[in-house]
Image (spheres, rainbow, N blue to C red):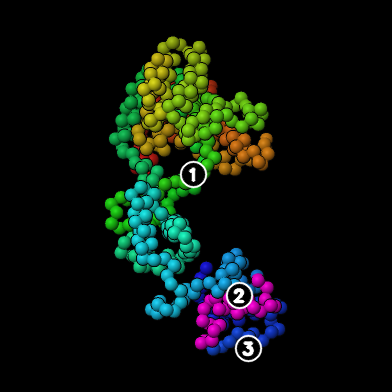
Amino acid sequence: MHKAVRSKELIMERISEIDYLCNDDWNTIIPDDLDSEFFSSFPAQLNFLRRLRELKIADLCYILRISTKTYYKLLPMLEKGQVEDENADEAEPNIGRPPNVTNEEELELLKQLEIQQCNGDCMSPYEARCWLEDHIKEKGRDVQLDRFWWYRFKRKHQDHFNVMKTHSLESCRADVSTDDINNHFQKFNSLITTPRAPQLILNMDESGFSQRPNKNATKNCICIKSCKVPPTFRDDRDGNHISIVASVTLSGRPLKPLLLSTTEKPPKEVTDSILGDDFLWFKTKKGYLNEAAMIYWIEQVLLPYVNHMKHFFPPDSVRPLLIFDGLKAHLTENVTRIFSENSIDILTLPPHASHLLQCLDLSFFGVMKRQFRITQSYLFRRDQKSARKIEKILKSFHTASFPSVILAGWKESGIDFTIKNGEIISLSLNKNRVMTKLLKQ
């Protein structure tokens, strides 16, 4: 809230817009003398008008251009005479209010800003103000720092830092070279020389359903000039996190989804509903994929599907190929041993290349996330938030599971194929499609 003194012209203009005040002679009520107490400070003006009984609080706030929330916030201090005047002459130490932040506290904020930058999580100006307010509150003082304090602080320390638009940490990590793409297609080409049924070429990945408002976005970050670490910030997440482990085949078919959460079991109202058989559930410490969850997915989803499909194809074309990114949980010693024991070939994508080479990221997850944002829950009550979220996830998953959506993702990842009578009869690799997208970035 700006506590500058309001001019008489502004006050009179606003008073003239209020019907029941137009009959009074406000020219005599509001003094003309700029040296009068009325023009000494904003608190003086607020107190003066507040004592006029005919003024409603909403109209008082309109005249002075403050919100009613600000008025009620200032009211206890007004009654105790504690409202600080921001327009006091700083050159005269005995006049006006003392600074609400000391030089030592400002230096502590500068140190914290550098620590945040070194940790890859720069503060925005608003976050810096909140941090300092909390820091001062721990010392037993309660202060409120507005944007005008921030502008003065920034001017005072302009040699130490500046504010700049910065990408999130995830965006800065997204770096892939043409050599990575070439190596990927060389490995892929060597793997498909072995005859493979499209139903046994699979892509798996996991995706979270927590809110990430800053994903792939930018924000104003405070950058300490002397710090050698480039400024970045981390994404925010909500607390009700659920991940989905999805897998699709080159024939356009999805496998049963696995939901990961921090709870031991899904809500009872979900398991008792018609959705109870549509998914599998696994608990992990943070709701993300780990080695135990990966092994559970292999044993409960992948192997049953692979063993079932092997009965429909000649023995020379039933060796499965699984494509995934280089997440540590995908490639632990126990996981790779299970793959080897079951004759499953794996192809690991280059780092940070999922947005170019992974079928699920190129089509399936995009459709699923968009559908999740707009779909509604109808099976559960409003207070059953976890159940409602699971319902939305499953609805979104099945919307994205149309064969045309899945096949579009495979094509975008550089795999061309010919379909005849609903069956894929040949496939080839199209590296140029991926290279073109890479060069446009």
Quadrant of the image containing the C terminus: top left
Q: Which residue is denoted by mark 3 in the rendering?
A: 28
Q: Nearer the viewer, residue 404 or 267?
A: 267
Cβ atoms under marks 2 and 1 closer than 8 Å? no
234 or 119, which is in the foreground?
119
Q: What residue is shown with label 2? A: 63
At 40% from the left and 43% from the top, the residue drawn is: 170
In three-dimensional space, the C-alpha distance between marks 1 and 3, rounded to whole angstroms, equals 57 Å
Q: Is residue 76 visible?
A: yes
Alpha carbon separation for disc pair 2 and 1: 41 Å
Q: Is residue 378 left or right of residue 38?
A: right
What x and y, as percent, mark residue 314? 46, 11
Q: Secondary structure beneath disc 2? A: helix
Residue 237 image label:
1
| Nearer to the camera, 93 or 221 | 93
Mark 2: few, some, or many residues within 10 Å (few <14, many ≥20)?
Answer: many
Q: Residue at x 52, y 78 (%)?
A: 41
Highlighted range, magenta = 34-57
Question: Label 2 is placed on what type of residue?
Answer: Ile
Crowd tier of the residue under label 1, counting other residues whose Cα lies within 10 Å: few below 14, some 14–19, many 20 or above: some
Residue 141 at x, y percent in the picture: 47, 62
- Disc 1 on helix, strand or loop? loop
Residue type at mark 3: give it: Thr
Mark 3 crowd level (few <14, some 14–19, many ≥20, 10 Å Cα): few
Q: Earlier in the sequence, mark 2 or mark 1?
A: 2
Helix, strand, or loop for circle 3? Answer: helix
Residue 180 in the magenta stretch? The answer is no
Type of the residue with mark 1: Arg
For marks 1 and 3, the one nearer the N-term is: 3
The span from disc 2 to disc 3 (Cα, nearest Å) is 17 Å
Q: Which residue is rendered at x = 64% and y = 38% of the image?
A: 384
